[in-house]
Amino acid sequence: MARSYFGDLAPIRYEGPESDNDFAFRQYDANEIVLGRPMKDHLRFAVAWWHSFAWEGGDPFGGRSFERPWYPQDTMESMQQKADAAFEMFSILGVPYFCWHDLDVRPEGASFSESRDRLDRWVDAVLPRIEETGVRCLWGTANMFTHRRWMAGAATNPDPDVFAYAAATVKTCLDATLRLGGENYVLWGGREGYETLLNTDMGRERQQAGRFLSMVVDYARKIGFTGQILIEPKPQEPSKHQYDFDVATVYGFLKDFGLENEVKVNIEQGHAILAGHSFEHEIHLARALGIFGSIDMNRNDYQSGWDTDQFPNNVPEVALAYYEILKAGGFTSGGTNFDARVRRQSIDPEDLILAHVGAMDTCAAGFKAAARMLEEGHLEAALTQRYAKWDASEAQTMLAGDLEAAAARVDVEGLDPVPGSGRQERLERLVNRYV
Ligand code: XLS
Ligand code: NI
Ligand code: NI
Protein backbone atom coordinates (compact mmCIF):
# COMPACT_ATOMS: atom_id res chain seq x y z
CA MET A 1 0.00 0.00 0.00
CA ALA A 2 1.18 3.51 -0.83
CA ARG A 3 2.47 5.55 2.10
CA SER A 4 0.33 8.55 2.93
CA TYR A 5 2.10 11.91 2.97
CA PHE A 6 -0.93 13.97 3.98
CA GLY A 7 -2.02 11.83 6.94
CA ASP A 8 -5.74 11.25 7.19
CA LEU A 9 -6.84 14.43 5.44
CA ALA A 10 -10.26 13.96 3.88
CA PRO A 11 -11.11 15.44 0.47
CA ILE A 12 -11.84 19.17 0.71
CA ARG A 13 -15.55 19.97 0.41
CA TYR A 14 -17.47 23.15 -0.25
CA GLU A 15 -19.00 24.53 2.95
CA GLY A 16 -19.83 28.10 1.89
CA PRO A 17 -18.56 31.57 2.83
CA GLU A 18 -19.58 31.28 6.50
CA SER A 19 -17.54 28.14 7.19
CA ASP A 20 -14.83 28.38 9.87
CA ASN A 21 -13.22 25.19 8.63
CA ASP A 22 -9.87 25.96 6.97
CA PHE A 23 -10.01 22.60 5.23
CA ALA A 24 -13.14 23.51 3.29
CA PHE A 25 -13.87 25.64 0.24
CA ARG A 26 -15.70 28.88 0.95
CA GLN A 27 -16.05 29.99 -2.68
CA TYR A 28 -15.22 27.06 -4.93
CA ASP A 29 -18.22 24.82 -5.36
CA ALA A 30 -17.02 22.59 -8.20
CA ASN A 31 -20.50 21.71 -9.42
CA GLU A 32 -22.12 25.12 -9.06
CA ILE A 33 -23.52 26.13 -12.43
CA VAL A 34 -22.18 29.47 -13.63
CA LEU A 35 -22.97 30.69 -17.16
CA GLY A 36 -24.53 27.31 -17.92
CA ARG A 37 -21.62 25.09 -16.88
CA PRO A 38 -20.18 23.66 -13.64
CA MET A 39 -17.48 25.89 -12.24
CA LYS A 40 -14.92 23.09 -12.42
CA ASP A 41 -15.30 23.02 -16.21
CA HIS A 42 -14.72 26.76 -16.47
CA LEU A 43 -11.71 26.98 -14.18
CA ARG A 44 -9.96 23.70 -15.07
CA PHE A 45 -7.50 23.84 -12.17
CA ALA A 46 -4.08 22.23 -12.45
CA VAL A 47 -1.33 21.58 -9.89
CA ALA A 48 2.29 22.21 -10.97
CA TRP A 49 4.42 19.15 -10.22
CA TRP A 50 7.62 21.23 -9.98
CA HIS A 51 6.72 23.75 -7.30
CA SER A 52 4.65 21.41 -5.16
CA PHE A 53 6.71 18.23 -5.24
CA ALA A 54 10.14 18.87 -6.78
CA TRP A 55 11.12 22.28 -5.37
CA GLU A 56 12.95 21.85 -2.07
CA GLY A 57 12.59 25.33 -0.58
CA GLY A 58 15.95 26.80 -1.58
CA ASP A 59 16.62 30.44 -2.45
CA PRO A 60 19.79 32.27 -3.59
CA PHE A 61 20.88 32.52 0.05
CA GLY A 62 19.93 29.16 1.47
CA GLY A 63 19.32 25.55 0.54
CA ARG A 64 16.57 23.06 1.15
CA SER A 65 14.07 24.04 3.85
CA PHE A 66 11.50 21.29 3.31
CA GLU A 67 11.81 17.70 4.44
CA ARG A 68 9.79 15.46 2.19
CA PRO A 69 10.11 11.68 2.36
CA TRP A 70 11.04 11.50 -1.34
CA TYR A 71 14.25 13.54 -0.90
CA PRO A 72 16.92 13.27 -2.20
CA GLN A 73 15.15 13.06 -5.56
CA ASP A 74 17.79 10.96 -7.26
CA THR A 75 16.30 7.47 -7.49
CA MET A 76 13.35 5.91 -9.27
CA GLU A 77 12.00 4.88 -5.83
CA SER A 78 11.82 8.54 -4.81
CA MET A 79 10.04 9.25 -8.09
CA GLN A 80 7.40 6.69 -7.17
CA GLN A 81 6.93 8.15 -3.68
CA LYS A 82 6.64 11.63 -5.13
CA ALA A 83 4.02 10.46 -7.62
CA ASP A 84 2.05 8.79 -4.81
CA ALA A 85 2.05 12.02 -2.79
CA ALA A 86 1.09 14.00 -5.90
CA PHE A 87 -1.96 11.87 -6.67
CA GLU A 88 -2.91 11.88 -3.00
CA MET A 89 -2.90 15.70 -3.08
CA PHE A 90 -4.84 15.88 -6.37
CA SER A 91 -7.57 13.75 -4.82
CA ILE A 92 -7.70 15.73 -1.58
CA LEU A 93 -8.05 18.97 -3.56
CA GLY A 94 -10.35 17.58 -6.22
CA VAL A 95 -8.32 19.22 -9.03
CA PRO A 96 -8.90 17.80 -12.50
CA TYR A 97 -5.36 18.36 -13.89
CA PHE A 98 -1.62 18.42 -13.31
CA CYS A 99 1.34 19.86 -15.28
CA TRP A 100 4.94 18.60 -15.34
CA HIS A 101 8.50 18.95 -16.66
CA ASP A 102 10.64 15.87 -17.34
CA LEU A 103 13.04 16.90 -14.57
CA ASP A 104 10.24 17.16 -11.96
CA VAL A 105 9.11 13.59 -12.35
CA ARG A 106 12.31 11.58 -12.77
CA PRO A 107 16.01 12.08 -12.05
CA GLU A 108 18.22 12.49 -15.12
CA GLY A 109 20.12 9.35 -16.10
CA ALA A 110 23.80 8.96 -16.91
CA SER A 111 22.95 9.13 -20.63
CA PHE A 112 20.14 10.57 -22.74
CA SER A 113 18.68 7.14 -23.36
CA GLU A 114 18.60 6.38 -19.64
CA SER A 115 16.81 9.69 -19.00
CA ARG A 116 14.30 8.80 -21.71
CA ASP A 117 13.70 5.32 -20.28
CA ARG A 118 13.09 6.81 -16.88
CA LEU A 119 10.53 9.24 -18.27
CA ASP A 120 8.79 6.31 -19.98
CA ARG A 121 8.73 4.45 -16.68
CA TRP A 122 7.15 7.46 -14.98
CA VAL A 123 4.47 7.53 -17.67
CA ASP A 124 3.91 3.78 -17.15
CA ALA A 125 3.50 4.42 -13.41
CA VAL A 126 1.16 7.37 -13.83
CA LEU A 127 -1.18 6.03 -16.52
CA PRO A 128 -3.05 3.69 -14.16
CA ARG A 129 -3.35 6.50 -11.60
CA ILE A 130 -4.93 8.73 -14.25
CA GLU A 131 -7.31 5.90 -15.05
CA GLU A 132 -8.29 5.33 -11.44
CA THR A 133 -8.53 8.98 -10.25
CA GLY A 134 -9.67 10.75 -13.42
CA VAL A 135 -7.01 13.44 -12.80
CA ARG A 136 -5.43 14.22 -16.16
CA CYS A 137 -2.48 15.99 -17.74
CA LEU A 138 -3.21 19.60 -18.72
CA TRP A 139 0.26 20.05 -20.18
CA GLY A 140 3.74 18.66 -20.28
CA THR A 141 6.97 20.53 -20.94
CA ALA A 142 10.74 20.03 -21.03
CA ASN A 143 13.07 21.55 -18.48
CA MET A 144 15.70 23.11 -20.71
CA PHE A 145 17.05 25.59 -18.18
CA THR A 146 18.39 23.83 -15.05
CA HIS A 147 21.24 21.64 -16.31
CA ARG A 148 24.47 23.45 -17.26
CA ARG A 149 24.21 22.23 -20.87
CA TRP A 150 21.40 24.77 -21.37
CA MET A 151 23.20 27.76 -19.90
CA ALA A 152 23.59 29.48 -23.29
CA GLY A 153 20.14 28.49 -24.49
CA ALA A 154 18.46 25.41 -25.94
CA ALA A 155 17.27 26.06 -29.53
CA THR A 156 19.10 29.42 -29.57
CA ASN A 157 22.43 27.97 -28.40
CA PRO A 158 25.61 28.93 -30.30
CA ASP A 159 26.44 25.19 -30.33
CA PRO A 160 24.35 23.10 -32.79
CA ASP A 161 24.92 20.00 -30.62
CA VAL A 162 22.78 21.64 -27.94
CA PHE A 163 20.09 22.32 -30.57
CA ALA A 164 20.09 18.58 -31.32
CA TYR A 165 19.90 17.75 -27.60
CA ALA A 166 16.97 20.16 -27.29
CA ALA A 167 15.26 18.44 -30.22
CA ALA A 168 15.72 15.05 -28.57
CA THR A 169 14.44 16.41 -25.26
CA VAL A 170 11.29 18.03 -26.67
CA LYS A 171 10.59 15.01 -28.85
CA THR A 172 10.73 12.77 -25.78
CA CYS A 173 8.52 15.09 -23.73
CA LEU A 174 5.98 15.42 -26.58
CA ASP A 175 5.87 11.62 -26.89
CA ALA A 176 5.24 11.37 -23.14
CA THR A 177 2.55 14.08 -23.25
CA LEU A 178 0.81 12.22 -26.07
CA ARG A 179 0.89 8.95 -24.12
CA LEU A 180 -0.57 10.71 -21.07
CA GLY A 181 -3.38 12.23 -23.14
CA GLY A 182 -2.11 15.75 -22.33
CA GLU A 183 -4.28 18.53 -23.69
CA ASN A 184 -1.44 20.99 -24.39
CA TYR A 185 2.33 21.13 -24.72
CA VAL A 186 4.18 24.20 -23.38
CA LEU A 187 7.49 25.78 -24.40
CA TRP A 188 8.95 28.27 -21.96
CA GLY A 189 12.34 29.62 -22.99
CA GLY A 190 14.04 30.75 -19.80
CA ARG A 191 17.48 30.43 -21.38
CA GLU A 192 16.40 31.49 -24.86
CA GLY A 193 17.84 34.98 -24.54
CA TYR A 194 21.15 36.51 -23.56
CA GLU A 195 23.30 37.77 -20.74
CA THR A 196 25.31 40.22 -22.88
CA LEU A 197 24.94 41.43 -26.46
CA LEU A 198 28.73 41.32 -26.72
CA ASN A 199 28.59 37.55 -27.29
CA THR A 200 25.16 37.35 -28.92
CA ASP A 201 23.83 37.35 -32.49
CA MET A 202 20.12 38.03 -32.00
CA GLY A 203 19.20 37.66 -35.67
CA ARG A 204 20.74 34.20 -35.87
CA GLU A 205 19.32 33.01 -32.57
CA ARG A 206 15.84 34.16 -33.54
CA GLN A 207 16.06 32.16 -36.78
CA GLN A 208 17.11 29.07 -34.83
CA ALA A 209 14.16 29.52 -32.46
CA GLY A 210 11.80 29.85 -35.42
CA ARG A 211 13.13 26.72 -37.10
CA PHE A 212 12.94 24.80 -33.84
CA LEU A 213 9.32 25.76 -33.21
CA SER A 214 8.37 24.80 -36.77
CA MET A 215 10.01 21.39 -36.25
CA VAL A 216 8.11 20.92 -32.99
CA VAL A 217 4.78 21.76 -34.64
CA ASP A 218 5.48 19.40 -37.57
CA TYR A 219 6.49 16.56 -35.27
CA ALA A 220 3.44 17.03 -33.03
CA ARG A 221 1.21 16.73 -36.10
CA LYS A 222 3.13 13.75 -37.39
CA ILE A 223 2.62 11.72 -34.22
CA GLY A 224 -1.07 12.67 -34.03
CA PHE A 225 -0.81 14.98 -31.05
CA THR A 226 -4.08 16.94 -31.24
CA GLY A 227 -3.36 19.08 -28.18
CA GLN A 228 -2.47 22.75 -28.36
CA ILE A 229 1.16 23.90 -28.57
CA LEU A 230 1.70 26.90 -26.30
CA ILE A 231 4.52 29.41 -25.81
CA GLU A 232 4.81 30.96 -22.36
CA PRO A 233 6.10 34.54 -22.66
CA LYS A 234 8.46 35.99 -20.06
CA PRO A 235 10.65 39.09 -20.52
CA GLN A 236 13.59 38.13 -18.31
CA GLU A 237 14.68 35.90 -15.42
CA PRO A 238 16.71 33.78 -15.46
CA SER A 239 18.24 35.45 -18.56
CA LYS A 240 18.86 39.20 -18.69
CA HIS A 241 16.61 39.33 -21.74
CA GLN A 242 14.35 36.60 -23.15
CA TYR A 243 13.11 36.52 -26.75
CA ASP A 244 9.54 35.51 -25.82
CA PHE A 245 9.22 38.87 -24.05
CA ASP A 246 5.44 39.27 -23.96
CA VAL A 247 2.31 38.42 -25.96
CA ALA A 248 2.91 41.12 -28.58
CA THR A 249 6.50 39.98 -29.18
CA VAL A 250 5.51 36.33 -29.40
CA TYR A 251 2.78 37.18 -31.91
CA GLY A 252 5.29 38.98 -34.14
CA PHE A 253 7.57 35.96 -33.92
CA LEU A 254 4.77 33.53 -34.80
CA LYS A 255 3.72 35.67 -37.78
CA ASP A 256 7.30 35.79 -38.98
CA PHE A 257 7.51 32.00 -39.08
CA GLY A 258 3.93 31.40 -40.27
CA LEU A 259 2.93 29.72 -37.01
CA GLU A 260 0.22 32.11 -35.79
CA ASN A 261 -2.51 29.57 -36.50
CA GLU A 262 -0.60 26.69 -34.92
CA VAL A 263 0.69 28.05 -31.64
CA LYS A 264 -1.04 29.94 -28.84
CA VAL A 265 0.15 31.41 -25.55
CA ASN A 266 0.19 30.33 -21.92
CA ILE A 267 0.08 33.60 -19.98
CA GLU A 268 1.50 33.85 -16.47
CA GLN A 269 0.43 36.64 -14.13
CA GLY A 270 3.92 37.24 -12.74
CA HIS A 271 5.48 37.32 -16.21
CA ALA A 272 2.97 39.93 -17.36
CA ILE A 273 3.97 42.14 -14.42
CA LEU A 274 7.69 41.63 -15.17
CA ALA A 275 7.03 42.81 -18.75
CA GLY A 276 5.45 45.99 -17.42
CA HIS A 277 1.89 44.91 -18.22
CA SER A 278 -1.08 43.78 -16.21
CA PHE A 279 -2.28 40.17 -16.39
CA GLU A 280 -5.53 41.31 -18.01
CA HIS A 281 -3.59 43.30 -20.62
CA GLU A 282 -1.78 40.16 -21.78
CA ILE A 283 -4.96 38.06 -21.87
CA HIS A 284 -6.88 40.85 -23.62
CA LEU A 285 -4.24 41.19 -26.32
CA ALA A 286 -3.94 37.42 -26.83
CA ARG A 287 -7.72 37.28 -27.21
CA ALA A 288 -7.65 40.14 -29.74
CA LEU A 289 -4.94 38.36 -31.74
CA GLY A 290 -6.65 34.96 -31.54
CA ILE A 291 -3.81 33.26 -29.67
CA PHE A 292 -5.17 32.94 -26.13
CA GLY A 293 -4.58 29.44 -24.77
CA SER A 294 -4.04 28.93 -21.05
CA ILE A 295 -2.89 30.65 -17.84
CA ASP A 296 -0.36 30.21 -15.05
CA MET A 297 -2.06 31.78 -12.06
CA ASN A 298 0.64 33.00 -9.71
CA ARG A 299 1.57 36.45 -8.52
CA ASN A 300 4.76 38.38 -7.87
CA ASP A 301 5.69 40.29 -4.76
CA TYR A 302 4.90 43.85 -5.82
CA GLN A 303 7.32 45.31 -3.28
CA SER A 304 10.41 43.34 -4.22
CA GLY A 305 9.44 43.10 -7.89
CA TRP A 306 10.64 39.50 -8.01
CA ASP A 307 8.85 36.68 -9.79
CA THR A 308 8.11 35.00 -6.47
CA ASP A 309 5.50 32.55 -7.80
CA GLN A 310 3.06 33.11 -4.96
CA PHE A 311 -0.43 31.71 -4.88
CA PRO A 312 -3.11 34.21 -5.98
CA ASN A 313 -5.03 35.94 -3.20
CA ASN A 314 -6.26 39.19 -4.75
CA VAL A 315 -9.87 38.76 -5.87
CA PRO A 316 -10.23 42.05 -7.84
CA GLU A 317 -7.11 41.26 -9.91
CA VAL A 318 -8.19 37.71 -10.57
CA ALA A 319 -11.69 38.89 -11.54
CA LEU A 320 -10.36 41.14 -14.31
CA ALA A 321 -8.27 38.27 -15.66
CA TYR A 322 -11.23 35.88 -15.78
CA TYR A 323 -13.36 38.62 -17.32
CA GLU A 324 -10.94 38.68 -20.25
CA ILE A 325 -10.91 34.88 -20.40
CA LEU A 326 -14.71 34.77 -20.49
CA LYS A 327 -14.69 37.35 -23.27
CA ALA A 328 -12.28 35.06 -25.13
CA GLY A 329 -14.99 32.39 -24.89
CA GLY A 330 -13.44 30.66 -21.86
CA PHE A 331 -10.80 27.96 -21.89
CA THR A 332 -10.88 25.32 -24.60
CA SER A 333 -7.79 23.15 -24.12
CA GLY A 334 -6.31 25.50 -21.52
CA GLY A 335 -6.87 25.86 -17.80
CA THR A 336 -5.78 27.54 -14.57
CA ASN A 337 -2.38 26.14 -13.63
CA PHE A 338 -1.01 27.07 -10.21
CA ASP A 339 2.60 27.66 -11.20
CA ALA A 340 3.00 28.70 -7.57
CA ARG A 341 4.97 27.60 -4.56
CA VAL A 342 4.48 27.95 -0.83
CA ARG A 343 6.98 30.17 1.00
CA ARG A 344 10.06 28.33 2.25
CA GLN A 345 8.92 28.56 5.87
CA SER A 346 5.65 26.79 5.02
CA ILE A 347 7.16 23.40 5.71
CA ASP A 348 4.13 21.35 6.75
CA PRO A 349 2.36 19.02 4.31
CA GLU A 350 -0.91 20.79 5.09
CA ASP A 351 0.60 24.12 3.98
CA LEU A 352 0.70 22.69 0.44
CA ILE A 353 -2.95 21.74 0.65
CA LEU A 354 -4.12 25.01 2.19
CA ALA A 355 -2.19 27.14 -0.32
CA HIS A 356 -4.14 25.47 -3.11
CA VAL A 357 -7.46 25.64 -1.26
CA GLY A 358 -7.01 29.39 -0.75
CA ALA A 359 -5.96 29.89 -4.35
CA MET A 360 -8.92 27.91 -5.68
CA ASP A 361 -11.27 29.98 -3.51
CA THR A 362 -9.67 33.23 -4.76
CA CYS A 363 -10.07 32.09 -8.36
CA ALA A 364 -13.67 31.00 -7.78
CA ALA A 365 -14.58 34.35 -6.17
CA GLY A 366 -12.91 36.26 -9.01
CA PHE A 367 -14.50 34.05 -11.62
CA LYS A 368 -17.99 34.46 -10.19
CA ALA A 369 -17.51 38.24 -10.12
CA ALA A 370 -16.34 38.15 -13.74
CA ALA A 371 -19.35 36.06 -14.75
CA ARG A 372 -21.70 38.60 -13.17
CA MET A 373 -19.84 41.44 -14.90
CA LEU A 374 -20.39 39.70 -18.19
CA GLU A 375 -23.99 38.67 -17.53
CA GLU A 376 -25.15 42.11 -16.47
CA GLY A 377 -23.39 43.56 -19.47
CA HIS A 378 -22.85 47.13 -18.25
CA LEU A 379 -19.14 47.14 -19.11
CA GLU A 380 -19.81 45.60 -22.48
CA ALA A 381 -22.58 48.13 -23.20
CA ALA A 382 -20.25 51.01 -22.38
CA LEU A 383 -17.65 49.58 -24.75
CA THR A 384 -20.15 49.09 -27.56
CA GLN A 385 -21.35 52.63 -27.12
CA ARG A 386 -17.81 54.03 -27.19
CA TYR A 387 -17.14 52.54 -30.63
CA ALA A 388 -20.69 52.80 -31.99
CA LYS A 389 -19.88 55.37 -34.69
CA TRP A 390 -17.53 52.88 -36.30
CA ASP A 391 -20.50 50.64 -37.09
CA ALA A 392 -21.92 53.22 -39.48
CA SER A 393 -21.45 52.38 -43.16
CA GLU A 394 -19.54 55.57 -44.01
CA ALA A 395 -16.98 54.72 -41.31
CA GLN A 396 -16.52 51.21 -42.69
CA THR A 397 -16.26 52.55 -46.24
CA MET A 398 -13.56 54.95 -45.08
CA LEU A 399 -11.63 52.11 -43.44
CA ALA A 400 -11.67 50.15 -46.70
CA GLY A 401 -10.70 53.17 -48.78
CA ASP A 402 -7.54 55.26 -49.19
CA LEU A 403 -6.01 58.18 -47.33
CA GLU A 404 -7.28 60.82 -49.78
CA ALA A 405 -10.86 59.60 -49.50
CA ALA A 406 -10.64 59.66 -45.71
CA ALA A 407 -9.11 63.13 -45.79
CA ALA A 408 -11.76 64.42 -48.18
CA ARG A 409 -14.49 63.76 -45.60
CA VAL A 410 -13.19 66.64 -43.50
CA ASP A 411 -13.90 69.21 -46.25
CA VAL A 412 -16.92 67.57 -47.85
CA GLU A 413 -18.78 66.84 -44.58
CA GLY A 414 -17.30 69.79 -42.72
CA LEU A 415 -16.09 67.48 -39.93
CA ASP A 416 -15.10 68.97 -36.57
CA PRO A 417 -14.82 66.08 -34.04
CA VAL A 418 -16.39 66.57 -30.63
CA PRO A 419 -14.48 64.64 -27.90
CA GLY A 420 -16.46 62.31 -25.63
CA SER A 421 -15.67 61.27 -22.05
CA GLY A 422 -13.71 58.04 -21.49
CA ARG A 423 -15.67 57.61 -18.23
CA GLN A 424 -12.81 55.80 -16.53
CA GLU A 425 -13.71 56.49 -12.89
CA ARG A 426 -17.31 55.55 -13.55
CA LEU A 427 -16.22 52.21 -15.03
CA GLU A 428 -13.77 51.53 -12.20
CA ARG A 429 -16.53 52.15 -9.68
CA LEU A 430 -18.80 49.86 -11.66
CA VAL A 431 -16.25 47.02 -11.38
CA ASN A 432 -16.16 47.51 -7.60
CA ARG A 433 -19.83 46.55 -7.44
CA TYR A 434 -18.85 43.02 -8.44
CA VAL A 435 -15.64 42.45 -6.54
C1 XLS B 1 9.08 30.09 -15.10
C2 XLS B 1 7.97 29.49 -15.83
C3 XLS B 1 7.94 27.97 -15.85
C4 XLS B 1 7.00 27.47 -16.91
C5 XLS B 1 7.20 26.04 -17.28
O1 XLS B 1 9.07 31.26 -14.74
O2 XLS B 1 6.79 30.00 -15.31
O3 XLS B 1 7.58 27.49 -14.59
O4 XLS B 1 5.67 27.65 -16.54
O5 XLS B 1 8.48 25.78 -17.70
NI1 NI C 1 7.09 31.80 -14.10
NI1 NI D 1 4.84 29.36 -15.73
Image: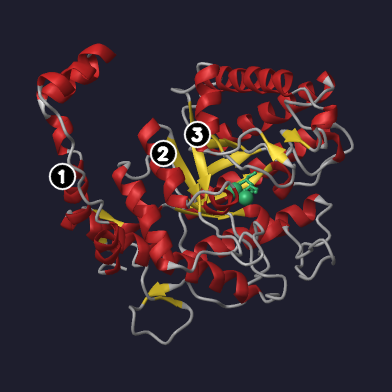
Q: Eyeballing the image, is 395 above or below 373?
A: above
Residue in the foreground of this view, choosing between 395 and 237: 395
Residue found at the very far right of the displayed protein: 110
Crowding near the residue tagged with mark 3, few <14, some 14–19, many ≥20 C-alpha atoms within 10 Å: some
Q: Which mark is residue 385?
A: 1
Q: Which mark is residue 248?
A: 3
Q: Which residue is mark 2?
A: 285
Q: Residue at x 30, y 62 (%)?
A: 428
Mark 2 touches mark 3? (CB < 8 Å): yes
Amino acid type of the residue tagged 1 in the rendering: Gln
x and y, in percent, of residue 239 in the image: 75, 42
Q: Earlier in the sequence, mark 3 or mark 1?
A: 3
- For label 3, being within 8 Å of ligand 2 is answered no
Q: Earlier in the sequence, mark 1 or mark 2?
A: 2
Camera-near label (3 vs 1) is 1
Kind of element beneath mark 3: helix
x and y, in percent, of residue 209 in the image: 67, 23
The picture quadrant where one finds residue 94 is bottom left
x and y, in percent, of residue 245 in the image: 60, 38
Kind of element beneath mark 2: helix
Residue in the foreground of this view, choosing between 375 and 410: 410
